[in-house]
Structures are given as structure tokens and as C-alpha cells.
Image (cartoon, grey):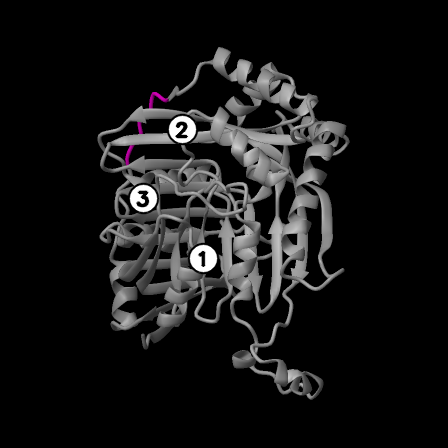
Amino acid sequence: MIRQKYSVTVQELLTFKSRLLAFSAGFEVSCILDSNEISAALGKNNYELLAGIGSKLSFSNTENDFSELKKFHEAQKDWLFGVMPYSNKSNDGNKTSNNQDLFFFQPLIVITITSINSLEWQVTILSELNPELVYSNIMESVLVDGTIQPASFAPVISKDQYINTISEIRSDIENGDYYELNFCQEFRTDQKNFDSELIYSKLCAKSPAPFSALLKIPGYELVCMSPERFLSHQQGSLVAQPIKGTRRRGANAEEDEKLMNELFFSEKERAENVMIVDLTRNDLSNVCPAGNVKVTELFGIYKFPHVIQMISTVEGQLKVELVNDKLADKVLQNELNEENINSDLPFKAIDNCFPMGSMTGAPKVEVMKRIAKYETGKRGFYSGCIGYISPEGDFDFNVVIRTLIYNKTLKQLSYWVGRAITFDSNSEEEYEECLLKAKGILS
């Protein structure tokens, strides 16, 4: 696809974002990835906002087959946007099918927003159509404001069921079956109509997050307020940022400081966090040279509108694998180009790390079998990831948490919440923490 390019400087960022939401409402398929001007603290994204609007071609797969996704990307050599649902792994490490499919699409229109300075942003539109006309259409679009009635969500399992399951998990851990399991529960409600653009706009204003996403694909609409990066790849550099550890926000700055210190020095939260950091390091080590994977931040404490989170950062550099062993002399002469290097590796990195350890527990394969046993339904898109792949093979994916998932066929809205369970977990406290995590969207 040959795209024309049009760039313009804007000063009213929120106004442009609102108009872009209104413009995207006219398309069945779209993906808007928004860092809400708070990404810098978590390792700056390349974009303040990146959007794919409309679908020219799409690819879906029931097995989360990343090799097939790579083939689709290579065939198009273009931007792709989409979602990978959570998938289990069997004893041999192979993924099992899920009730929702991996779905990626080649957009008709790509829109990027990057910061020029604190007051100005550059909007770039890439399109086969006249991109200047696309910009004009965006600027003529208006998002109709309205009142959103709180939905009456009901938990799929009762509090007693939740507490009993936590007891079983703790017994497994005491028996040495595994160390930690992320147990999740679903809240659900019937919903005849779902204005995803308006709800997304309201939530970005109320609970902004650095890895927010609005995704519309056939059959589903996802409104995601994720604070967590799953995996980023930029020119050979990999970054994962698992979250483990949560506290509520304080009523004032003094209480915030107290809660941040409480989280930072919590032995339980540190143990959970470092366990997932070690798992992530191991996942990345399969595609990075020996000794290359580094923990660049351990137990970072970050404030969000409703919660305080403990976030660690793990980084590595992809191996240089040659497609032909005879190219070794070119390595010494710095004569390698992209065609000489194995382009499978970025997709292998996704395959090795997915699903992310922060949403499973450790050891990963064993706890995923137990997740299938203890959770009442399939997670589907929840604890999967949403993101993009660039024409060059760079990518950035979030973790699908704090996400409203609307099933357009069933007219049903769902929301999942999870907690990492260890032997030291208190079932009553874990249940209350689940409600706290849900507060930002369900209230």
C-alpha cells in the first residue's frame, strides 16, 4: 500500500482527540492507542497517540499463531493494528484455542500524534486517500456529549465462591504445586446499546492511563484503560513492564506518600513483583544474547487516578541471527542489512513472552492449567494485549486489563479483575482489592 502523507501542527490536543473519536465512529473497524500525556514516566512511547481507522485487509486466527501473523505482516509490509486474546498452554507449551480470536487489520488510514513541545503536537495522516481531505473530515466531526448511566454489573461468582477458591489455591501452593497464581473474576451485565467512543472519552478524562485503547472489530468493542505495557520492540530493543502490587490513592498528598511507602516496603508485594520479573527475564532470555537482559527498574512506584502501582522494567536486545551462516564475515565488516537478519525474532519474542507473567503467575505453564481449572469462564480478550506492528516490524502492546468488553452479538458487557495469589494472601483482602481495581470503571 502506497500512502500519501499530510502533517499539521495542532495546539488543542484534547479537541483534536475528541474529533478523531467522532470520526472513527463512522467505521466498523478501528483502533486508537492513546498515552494520555503520561507515558514519559513509564518509558516514553514513540507516539502520544497512534490510530488505525477502517480496514482494508484483516487476519484472524483461533490459535494465536504468531508465525501466521508474521506471514500476514510480511505480505502487506504495512501497519497492522489488533488484539491477541489470552491463550492457555498445554504441557508441551503449545497454545490451546480460545473463545475469541486473534484479530489484526491493515488500516485504510493511519494517524500519529507526536509532541513538538509542551504546547504543540504534530498530527500526521497516512492514507491512500487524500490525507488532507481526511484531516478536514476529522476537523468537521463532533463527538456528541451525553450522560452515561452506570451499568449494573454482577459478579459471575459469589464472594463465598471466590474465598473458597483462594483457599484451594493456597493449598496448592502449600503443597508445592506452584508459587503464585493470578486468579481473575468476571463482572457482567446485559447492555442493549454501547457508545464506545463516548465511554472511552469519559474514562480518559476520569481515569487516564498510559496504554489506553479503543478497539472496534467485528463482533466486539473494547474500551481499555490499561496502565501496563506487555512488550515493546523498537529497532531490536525489547522492553517489558510487568505490574504487581497495588494500593488505593490517598485522600491527600500526605496519605498518598504513606501508601506509596507502604507499597514499596511491602514484603508480600515485593515477593510477587520480583517473581514475575524473574519470569519475564527468563522469557526474554530465549531471544536475547546471554547476559543481555537487564532489570532497569525494580519496584518503581507510580500514581494513577484511583490506584498506586508497583511497576518494574525489564529490557533486552534481540539476538542477531543470520539467515545464512556464510554471512559471518559481513558481521565483522558491518555490512549487514535487514535482509541478512532473521526477521522472525521479534515475533518469537511475542510468542515466548505471551501471555504475560503478570497475568498468569509462576511457573507459567503449570499455573495456566490451574487457571483453566479454577476460573469459571474463558478470559477471552482479557489479559491478552492490544497494539500495533509498524511496517518495519517494530511493535508496542499493552496488557488488556481495566477493560470493558462489549459483545455486540449477545448485547453483553463484561469486565474482569484479577489478583496475584500467594500462600500469604488473605482471601478477604484479595476480594476487596479486586473491588478497588474495578472502581475506576465500574463506578
Residue 7 placement: quadrant: bottom left
Q: Which residue is mark 2?
A: 377
Q: Relative to 216, say whether 10 is above or below.
A: below
Question: Percent position (x, y) of residue 130?
Answer: 26, 73
User: Who is closer to the viewer here, 386 or 260?
Assistant: 386
Mark 1 crowdedness (10 Å alpha carbons): few <14, some 14-19, many ≥20: some
Q: Secondary structure at mark 1?
A: helix
Question: Percent position (x, y) of residue 173?
Answer: 66, 25
Q: Secondary structure at mark 3?
A: helix
Marks 1 and 3: which is nearer the front?
A: 1
State which tag comes first along the sequence, 3 or 2.
3
What is the spatial separation of the Cα atoms under label 1 and label 3, in whole angstroms? 30 Å
State which tag comes first along the sequence, 1 or 3.
1
Q: Is 148 within the magenta?
A: yes
User: Who is closer to the viewer here, 372 or 148?
Assistant: 372
State which tag comes first along the sequence, 2 or 1.
1
Total labels: the figure holds 3
The residue drawn where x is 61% and y is 83% is 336
- Numbered range of the magenta stretch: 146-153
The three-letter code of the residue at mark 2 reads Gly
The residue drawn where x is 28% and y is 30% is 412
Residue 266 appears in the picture as rendered = no
The residue drawn where x is 66% and y is 21% is 425
Q: Which residue is mark 3?
A: 197
The three-letter code of the residue at mark 3 reads Glu
Q: Which residue is mark 1?
A: 66
What is the spatial separation of the Cα atoms under label 3 and label 2, in whole angstroms? 27 Å
Marks 3 and 2: which is nearer the front?
A: 2
